[in-house]
Image (cartoon, rainbow, N blue to C red):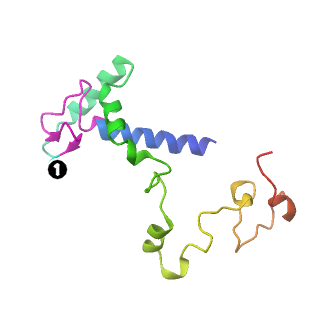
Amino acid sequence: MRSQDLAILRFLLAILTTVYSRFDANDEPYEWLDVDKEALQVSQSVDDDEYDQSDLQETWHQLFQAGHFSEIVIRYLNQHQKQFDLFGSQPFYQVTADQYDLLVPTKKKVASGSGTVSIKQMNRLISESNNTPSLFTPKSEDEKKQNCFR
């Protein structure tokens, strides 16, 4: 789906922006930035007037001319691999029911049986929840509960 393509593109751009706002095309930290090379993290924040935007533009120009990204991206992904795990204790791009419940009012807690999704909610032709049935769905009530991936 195009919406999924856009979400993945934004995610990949976020990774590249993170890496190349710290390191140039030669995998060296910018002179105006204090970076821990082992942790690949900024050690000290930078004021807006301290950084040189032309350095960032030159990095992207060099990457475009090279036709590929530098090794620092692979190092960053390897180092932060656990943070991108979809099934770990903190699933990537997801929140647990406990985290959700901490952030929402008490009356909107995750319902019992959390972690389950009915088949009708996976089929995007049926836009309804258990509280508000869709009036103009192209499927009958029995068909909504059938496998939508046939």
The image position of residue 84, as x and y in percent, is 43, 45
In the picture, measured across the screen, residue 19 lies left or right of residue 109, that is left
- Among the 4 quarters of the image, the one containing residue 19: top left
Q: Where are the magenta residues, as a range?
A: 20-42
The residue lying at 60 percent from left, 74 percent from top is 111
The residue lying at 17 percent from left, 40 percent from top is 35
Residue indicated by mark 1? 45
**Quick one: label 1, few (<14), some, or many (20+) residues within 10 Å?**
few
In the picture, measured across the screen, residue 147 lies left or right of residue 27, that is right
In the picture, measured across the screen, residue 137 lies left or right of residue 101, that is right
Outermost residue on the bottom side: it is: 107
Q: Is residue 9 above or below residue 148?
A: above
Give the prevailing secondary structure in the magenta stretch: loop
The image position of residue 149, as x and y in percent, is 76, 46
Between residue 38 and residue 11, name the one nearer to us. 38
The residue lying at 72 percent from left, 72 percent from top is 132
Q: Quadrant of the N terminus?
A: top right
The image position of residue 91, as x and y in percent, is 47, 54
The image position of residue 98, as x and y in percent, is 46, 70
- Among the 4 quarters of the image, the one containing residue 116: bottom right
How many numbered callouts? Answer: 1
Dot 1: element? loop
Q: Quadrant of the C terminus?
A: top right
Q: Is residue 42 visible?
A: yes
Amino acid tagged 1: Ser
Magenta-span inclusion, residue 129: no
Between residue 98 and residue 53, name the one nearer to us. 98
- Among the 4 quarters of the image, the one containing residue 114: bottom right
In the picture, measured across the screen, residue 35 lies left or right of residue 132, that is left
Magenta-span inclusion, residue 38: yes
Q: Is residue 12 above or below residue 61?
A: below
